[in-house]
Image (cartoon, helix red, strand yellow):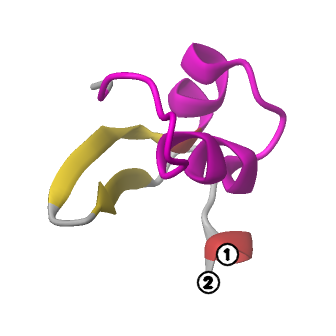
Amino acid sequence: MIEEVDDDDDVLILHRGTLRAHNVAHTLREIHQHPTLAKVFANLTADNAPEASR
């Protein structure tokens, strides 16, 4: 449940068996310049997704 992730929680985003991102939630939002973790997830799992971040 993505809504239950706190700012300081460690987050791994996997897509088709590949690690797309690993960091704390607030840092992932900052790196990807999205206001929500759901938008970060959508961006990283889209067909035209950018390279993985850590």
| Mark 2: few/some/many CA within 10 Å (<14, 14-19, 20+) | few
Label 2 or label 1, whichever lies nearer to me, is 2
User: Which residue is pictured at 29% across the width and 40% down the height?
Assistant: 22
Left or right: residue 27 compared with residue 10: right
For mark 2, give the secondary structure.
loop
Residue beneath disc 1: 4
Image quadrant holding the N terminus, namely bottom right
Residue drawn at 17 percent across, 53 percent down: 18
Where in the figure is residue 48, as x and y percent of width and height? 51, 34
Residue type at mark 2 is Met
Mark 1 is surrounded, within 10 Å at the Cα level, by few (under 14), some (14 to 19) or many (20 or more) other residues, namely few
Instruction: Identify the amino acid type marked 1.
Output: Glu
Q: Which residues are magenta?
A: 26-52
Residue, x 33% and y 39% (percent of image)? 21
Reply yes or no: does residue 28 show up in magenta: yes
- Residue 3 in the figure: left or right of residue 42: right
Marks 2,1: beta carbons within 8 A: yes
Identify the mark at residue 31; answer none if there is no mark: none
Disc 1 is placed on an element classified as helix
Q: Quadrant of residue 34?
A: top right
* Percent x, y of residue 26: 61, 33
Of the pair 25 and 43, the residue shown nearer to us? 43
Residue at far right of view: 35
Q: CA distance from mark 2 to mark 1?
A: 6 Å
Residue lying farthest to the bottom in this orientation:
1
Q: Position of residue 29 (x, y in %)?
A: 65, 30
In the image, taking residue 22 as reference, residue 48 lies left or right, namely right
Q: Which residue is mark 2?
A: 1
Q: Quadrant of residue 6?
A: bottom right
